Amino acid sequence: MTPALPFETASFPFPVQLVFEESADRLRVTVDVAPATADDLTVEVGSSRLRIAVNDGPDIADCTLTPLPSDLAFGDDRHATYNNGVLTIILETQARRG
């Protein structure tokens, strides 16, 4: 398992942990979004970007991450779960095509 990757979330008020599991070809993102509920969350995934938005009362906290090296992209196997205030996103990684 590779340690958490560097990323910029200075304006995002929720703790984020990124772990690239190289042997499993996946990226695991964990965000402590409490007291937000699952209905307050939006997760969008592109080929190399991950966007997390949390409707936090009158404001929306938004964070866009591009955590992968340039030779990797997100694959089709994508899962997100919410449990007790913790959002966990698991994204398959694969070699970038073309």
Image (spheres, rainbow, N blue to C red):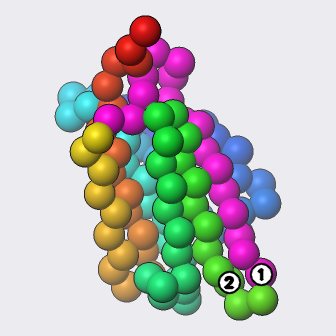
Q: Which region is colored magenta?
A: 59-75
- Residue found at the far top of this picture: 98
- Tag 1's secondary structure? strand
Q: Is residue 17 visible?
A: no
Q: Nearer the viewer, residue 17 or 40?
A: 40
Bin the neighbour count of mark 2 within 10 Å (Cα to Cα): few under 14, some 14-19, many 20 and up: some
Amino acid at circle 2:
Asp
Q: Residue at x 21, y 29 (%)?
A: 23
Residue 70 magenta-highlighted:
yes
- For disc 2, the marked residue is 56
Whole-angstrom CA distance, mark 1 to mark 2, is 5 Å
Amino acid at circle 1:
Asp
Q: Residue at x 34, y 18 (%)?
A: 95
Residue 85 magenta-highlighted:
no
State which quadrant residue 1 falls in: top left
Question: Picture coordinates of residue 37 (x, y %)?
Answer: 48, 87
Q: Residue at x 51, y 34 (%)?
A: 48
Above or below, comparing residue 37 to residue 92 in the picture:
below
Above or below, comparing residue 75 to residue 88 in the picture:
above
Label 1 with label 2: CB-CB less than 8 Å: yes
Bin the neighbour count of mark 1 within 10 Å (Cα to Cα): few under 14, some 14-19, many 20 and up: few
Side (left or right) of 74 relative to 67? left
Count how many numbered circles sit on residues in the image: 2
Question: Picture coordinates of residue 74 (x, y %)?
Answer: 39, 35
Quadrant of the snapshot with the C terminus: top left
Q: For residue 59, which numbered disc appears in the image? A: 1
Question: Picture coordinates of residue 97 (x, y %)?
Answer: 38, 14
Q: Residue at x 25, y 45 (%)?
A: 77
